[in-house]
Image (spheres, grey):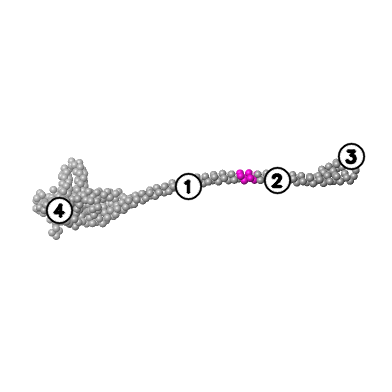
């Protein structure tokens, strides 16, 4: 085998051209894509970490909100219980008062009616006695007539009052 | 052994088989690379793209084993071109050969009467071979590496690059010079010898005829392995040389 420097030169030229072509048309784009993928993966990992943080934060918030709601609900129920009890007491008190008032009024009415009746009877009786006295004085009456008279007046009382 | 067709054009001796081999290897390498980067995709790469990315990562880690990680990037393209081109070149001569016989002097192919006489009346001309089975071609590759290494050494690391010729003492200069020259020479010879030996053995086994078929299968398989190893070696040695010349390691300052 002889050494041909022409082959050497051709090999060098071919290699350099191949290097240039590959870099321009093959490796350049390929490296670009690989770099892009690296960035993509990094980005996705970053966003995943961020999402997890966000989720944790939200969960914490939700927990707190739930706690708050529970507390509020308990407060509302307690309040409702106390107001209910108070209202019941009030109603009871009112009803008792009302009943007392009605009873007193009725008693008073009875009293006044009785007084009225008594005074009316008194007036009647006095009038009758005056009338009886004048009749006795006016004329002589026998036993029988007197009896008749008394009866007559008693009857009169019965119908008048 | 086979002769190779050499055409004399305007005083130049063109070894046609070497030229064809170099050209075909370069084209195949380029076509493979182009096919791999067709329809590039970030999230849905094709099989070939996956393979190519694996090669890229392999070369990257290979280079990273010789120099600091942040210096790797500019040499990845070079390493890829070297490993792919040399691997394709190493395999090119394996699957078949094209041989013609010449019984008469063919002056334009470099077959003179004298050469015919020497080979006993007829010669065999091999038109197809691995380009790397030709010392002229591997010398070209080694020369590219040699020039690149010393250019990078002078450009990026001038002070330490020049100083290293006189270390550990100034009178070591001749030794360092020999080492510097030996590097590309061994680079070229190692690659050439391995591939050429493989092809010689294939040619020898072919002479066995039918009996040689199992040997041929085994040897071809082994030749693929050797081709891959040699491509890898050439690449990593190139990177080692670049690293030695161009990248100054702070910790080795004291040596």
* Rendered residue at 19%/42% (across/down): B215
Q: Crowdedness of circle 4 by 10 Å Cα count: few (<14), some, many (20+)?
A: some
Viewer-closest of B153 and A140:
A140
Question: Residue B226: x, y in percent?
Answer: 19, 46
> Cα distance, mark 3 to mark 2?
47 Å
Q: Which residue position holds label 3?
A: A143
Magenta span includes B86: no
Q: Which mark is residue B29?
A: none
Judging from the image, what secondary structure is the residue with disc 1 in? Answer: helix
Q: Which mark is residue A108?
A: 2
Q: Is residue A98 magenta?
A: yes
Label 2, label 4: how many angstroms apart (C-alpha)?
A: 136 Å
Q: Mark 3 and mark 1: span between their CA atoms?
A: 103 Å
* Magenta residues, start to end: A92-99
Residue underneath mark 4: B164
Marks 4 and 3, how far apart at CA = 181 Å
From the viewer's perspective, is B191 left or right of A98? left
- Dot 3 or dot 2: first in sequence order is 2
Q: Main secondary structure of the magenta part?
A: helix
Q: Is residue B48 visible?
A: no
Tag 1 residue:
A69
Callout 3 and callout 1 share a chain: yes
Disc number lying in front (2 or 1): 2
Measured in 3D between alpha carbons, the distance from the residue under mark 4 to the one under mark 1, in whole angstroms, is 79 Å
Parent chain of label 3: A
């Amino acid at each position: 085998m002889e050494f041909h420097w022409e082959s050497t030169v051709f090999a060098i030229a071919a290699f350099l051209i191949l290097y240039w072509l590959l870099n321009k048309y093959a490796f350049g784009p390929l490296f670009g894509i690989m770099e892009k993928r690296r960035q993509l993966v990094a980005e996705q990992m970053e966003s995943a970490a961020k999402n997890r943080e966000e989720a944790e934060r939200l969960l914490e918030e939700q927990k707190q909100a739930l706690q708050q709601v529970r507390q509020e609900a308990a407060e509302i129920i307690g309040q409702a219980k106390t107001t209910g009890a108070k209202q019941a007491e009030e109603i009871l008190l009112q009803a008792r008062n009302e009943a007392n008032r009605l009873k007193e009024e009725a008693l008073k009415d009875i009293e006044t009616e009785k007084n009225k009746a008594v005074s009316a009877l008194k007036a009647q009786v006095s009038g009758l006695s005056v009338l009886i006295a004048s009749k006795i004085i006016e004329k002589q009456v026998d036993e029988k007539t007197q009896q008749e008279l008394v009866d007559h007046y008693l009857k009169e009382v019965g119908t008048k009052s | 052994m086979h002769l190779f067709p050499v055409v004399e054009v305007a005083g130049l001796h063109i070894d046609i088989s070497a030229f064809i081999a170099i050209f075909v290897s370069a084209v195949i390498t380029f076509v493979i690379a182009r096919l791999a980067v067709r329809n590039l995709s970030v999230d849905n790469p094709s099989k070939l793209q996956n393979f190519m990315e694996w090669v890229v990562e392999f070369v990257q880690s290979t280079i990273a084993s010789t120099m600091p990680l942040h210096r790797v990037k500019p040499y990845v393209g070079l390493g890829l071109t070297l490993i792919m081109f040399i691997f394709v070149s190493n395999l090119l001569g394996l699957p078949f050969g094209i041989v013609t016989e010449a019984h008469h002097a063919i002056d334009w192919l470099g077959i003179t009467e004298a050469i015919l006489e020497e080979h006993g009346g007829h010669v065999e001309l091999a038109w197809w071979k691995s380009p790397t089975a030709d010392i002229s071609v591997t010398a070209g590759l080694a020369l590219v590496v040699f020039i690149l290494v010393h250019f990078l050494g002078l450009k990026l690391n001038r002070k330490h690059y020049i100083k290293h010729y006189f270390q550990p003492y100034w009178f070591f200069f001749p030794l360092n010079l020999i080492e510097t020259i030996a590097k590309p020479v061994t680079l070229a010879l190692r690659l050439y010898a391995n591939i050429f030996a493989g092809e010689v053995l294939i040619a020898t086994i072919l002479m066995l005829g039918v009996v040689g078929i199992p040997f041929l299968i085994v040897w071809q398989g082994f030749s693929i392995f050797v081709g891959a190893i040699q491509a890898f070696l050439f690449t990593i040695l190139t990177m080692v040389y670049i690293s030695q010349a161009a990248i100054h390691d702070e910790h080795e300052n004291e040596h």
